[in-house]
Image: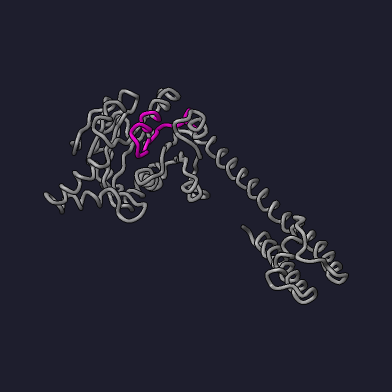
Amino acid sequence: MNKLFRSKMYQALSLLVLVLVFGVMGYRFLSGYTWVDAFYMTIITVTTVGFSEVRPLDVASKLFTVVLIISSVFIFAFAISVITEYILSRNSLQLLKKKKVLNKISSLSNHVIICGFGRNGQQAAERLKAYKRPFVVVEKDKAVIEKLEGDILYVEGDANEDEVLHQAGIKKAQYLISAMPDDAANLFVVLSARQLNKDLFIISRAAQVTTQKKLKLAGANKVVMPDKIGGDHMASLVVMPDLITFMDKLSVEGEHTTNLEELSIDSFMGKVEDKSIRDLDLRKKTGCTIIGYIEPSGTYIINPEAELKLLPGGKIIVLGRPEQIKKLNEMFHLD
């Protein structure tokens, strides 16, 4: 509620209280009613419900009643107009906000759709923010949606409905993350998404081991079990705590900073054609170290040799401090 509506609302409430006090005091001291009778007479008068008076009114009381009715009619009309104006303007504002968000979503391409904004959905959104990847959240909980307004692109609705997925831009999306807590809901989302976009890369959350196979059959490319990962992580902290802590720092060091980066060979714009890792010499130029190479066929090579030829369609995994990763992005215009 903005300042203008707030001031009008306070003014309307003040006038309503004033007319009630005016009526009670008038009937109490002008007509000699008790406090309860004076309050009763004021209420039936200003609301015009038509109940009978406590006792017949004298001339002075009748004139006072006429004044009270006229003043209360105008004040109640003013209060109703203020409330109506606020409700209509709020609804219009919400419609404008929703239309603006949908227009922004329609301009996206190769973005990520996150279905469900619980703990896993929020964590996924934070990581995508760190990598500056555009994404849209699909959530049906109004309380959650209110928190998202102005910060994240969102679509309010059930992710199981095709129309909602269309609003999220599923036809032009590159990835979909189904992070809802219920396996059945994730299964339906995966089925719907796969039907709407055959090329979509779908990542789904699963709570039960038995659900993994069903999700993959439904069309999920990857299935993640957060509870299993969390348990493995905690056990690893017991067996090799320093190594796991070090690995955690590789992923994120501070807020929205990263030490690991996956880069497509094609993104180097012809600068690495027919070149090896040694020729690229990222260590000398940026300080980053290549710790992995993914061949165009999908084969993973850990700690590749310096003589390894970099082929179009392949990818490299680099390790570096945040400032080194930033220098790499700036040097090859990868942002």
Location of residue 22 in the rendering, given as x and y in whole percent from the top left corner: 75, 71
Query: Quadrant location of residue 218?
Result: top left
Most extreme residue toward the front is 55
Out of 312 and 107, give the one closest to the viewer: 107
Residue 31 visible in image: yes
Q: Residue at x 71, y 71 (%)?
A: 21
Colour mapping used in the image: one colour
Out of 64 and 204, give the one closest to the viewer: 64
Location of residue 61 in the rendering, given as x and y in whole percent from the top left corner: 83, 70
Asked if the stretch drawn in magenta spans residue 128, the answer is no
Q: Is residue 313 left or right of residue 154?
A: left
Asked if the stretch drawn in magenta spans residue 180, the answer is yes
Q: Residue at x 41, y 23 (%)?
A: 198
Residue 329 visible in image: no
Quadrant where the C terminus sits is: top left
Out of 240 and 324, give the one closest to the viewer: 240
Location of residue 214 in the rendering, given as x and y in whole percent from the top left corner: 29, 26
Stretch in magenta: 169-189
Most extreme residue toward the right is 59
Q: Is residue 316 left or right of residue 18?
A: left
Quadrant where the N terminus sits is: bottom right
Q: Is residue 209 left or right of residue 39?
A: left
Q: Is residue 322 left or right of residue 73?
A: left
**Residue 298 position (above or below residue 49):** above
Location of residue 59 in the rendering, given as x and y in whole percent from the top left corner: 88, 70
